[in-house]
């Protein structure tokens, strides 16, 4: 599993296909196996009490797995999530960015499988764990 | 498992605790076991191509499981998702509301487990399937 | 989704491909969408205390989803599980058979998705819930 | 999260509570966070074609998560699996032992969450991925 895009190219691609969240997700590292992604947390992602909402963490895990997959197959905007499972384990620290560390475990012809750990920046223990399966469209 | 709140009381409670999405989620039916919830789909939930995004479906499944649990334990805003798993199976029909049908499978002292099927309104086959575990805070 | 095999044909097929568990799994009902399967519980499936073990319930869910899929695509011994998620919710009743009720939610070209509820015979509330994804080999 | 049992003590405990599989599971490493467990594969675990069956991999993941949890809380035979999710990603190599590498991600008062990667001995890429939640009984 080898990267065919750089972190810089991936960030430009994300801004292009998801203009509505431009700047919220930043790829900090990317190789054929590991991806590190930052989500800039702002007011809109918070629940009462200052905690980051579940859908926000789902979105981060989803984007990180998408990036981990595209890093190896190239720009395929039609790649879609088919399955995911998440454990929410700790309350994120209020006011901190979230960091997702994704590992691409399988890249098959039809499917990719990634595992993602999400951390509040600067913390040792993850706030959430996710696995994501993406369906890869057949080459036309 | 017996409902201690009506659909009407639940809708008022949701508007109260999630004012930011007021009117987007409507409980249409609720008893001790089954919950039917409508999500009014608008422009903000759509991805390019007119399809409803994954995070939007996650949010609907999450809220439906929350309502199924609270219907039996009463207003406990602190009840939190600890685990979920989703299968995205079909593309939602563009421009239609989503309907979630949740079944409460277990209501224990610490945990509830729900199963949710999500449909584009008027369709026979589900667009997504989810299971959600909620942690119930100890009575103080 | 339409059945191309009868329950009788399926039972003969299972005895053929899994001779080592002959008679343990019996298809009691099968149509294009719903499958009901009995697992005869004997000493070897029990943990200390008389409860059915987790791997036994996994096996039952797995076989029920396999049958639900094959009922529609025909004898394809190479169909394999790619993903599953299980919730263990109650202790099975000691000395009772397990009944799995599987629903085929999606039958695509490459994948099938099933949902399974497992009951101790004669009980109203499920002991376990599972979802299973099977990969369907391409027609050669 | 700190280990309160050694690998040696754990192996003796497993032989004691699961005499029916004595010698099949061996803890090779154990600390408060990481557990490495070997499963000796023999004829009974194989499916036609020489591959290890799904229930066998489920069992290994389950035992590895149990050991990861007990390493920190001590001998609690009543600790039970409440949720799991598995991805089966590659065919195990015929005739090789399986090695599970479990990481304890959370140890709460009521629940533990572990992540497990399973390998055919000597291979770089995992054959399966699992996450397991265990319920921890209240101290009496």
Image: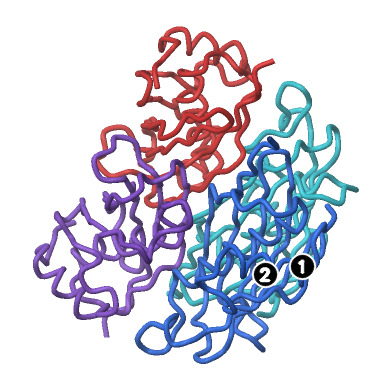
Chain colours: A cyan, B red, C purple, D blue
Q: CA distance from mark 2 to mark 1?
A: 7 Å
Q: Is residue A74 above or below residue C26?
A: below
Q: Are marks 2 and 1 in contact (CB under 8 Å)?
A: yes
Q: Is residue B87 left or right of residue C105?
A: right
Q: Which residue is mark 2?
A: A71
Give whichever of A87, A51 is nearer the camera: A87
For numbered disc 1, what is the local secondary structure?
A: strand
A54 sits to left or right of A134: right
For the C terminus of chain C, the quadrant is: bottom left
Observer-nearest residue: D14 or B4? D14
In the depicted structure, whether residue D5 falls above or below residue A95: below
Q: Does the rendering let one see residue C132?
A: yes
Q: Position of residue C92 (x, y in %)?
A: 38, 46
**Image height check: is C34 above or below A67?**
above
- Left or right of residue D75, residue B129 in this image: left
- Quarter of the image where one finds residue B80: top right
Q: Position of residue B107 (x, y in %)?
A: 47, 29
Q: Which residue is mark 1?
A: A30
Pointer 2 chain: A
**Are there few (<14), some (14-19), or many (20+) residues within 10 Å of tag 2?**
many
In the image, residue C52 lies at what x, y percent? 40, 55
Name the quadrant of the N terminus of chain C.
bottom left
Residue at 56% over, 41% down:
B55
Task: Point out residue A105 in the picture as x, y percentages from the top left corner.
Answer: 63, 71
């Amino acid at each position: 599993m080898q990267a065919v895009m750089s972190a810089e190219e991936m960030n430009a691609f994300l801004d292009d296909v998801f203009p509505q969240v431009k700047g919220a997700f930043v790829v900090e590292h990317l190789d054929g196996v590991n991806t590190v992604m930052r989500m800039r947390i702002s007011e809109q992602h918070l629940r009462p009490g200052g905690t980051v909402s579940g859908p926000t963490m789902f979105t981060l895990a989803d984007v990180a797995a998408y990036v981990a997959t595209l890093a190896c197959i190239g720009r395929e905007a039609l790649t879609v999530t088919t399955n995911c499972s998440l454990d929410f384990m700790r309350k994120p620290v209020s006011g901190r960015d979230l960091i997702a560390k994704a590992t691409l475990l399988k890249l098959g012809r039809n499917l990719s499988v990634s595992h993602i750990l999400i951390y509040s920046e600067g913390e040792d223990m993850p706030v959430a764990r996710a696995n994501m399966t993406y369906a890869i469209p057949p080459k036309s």
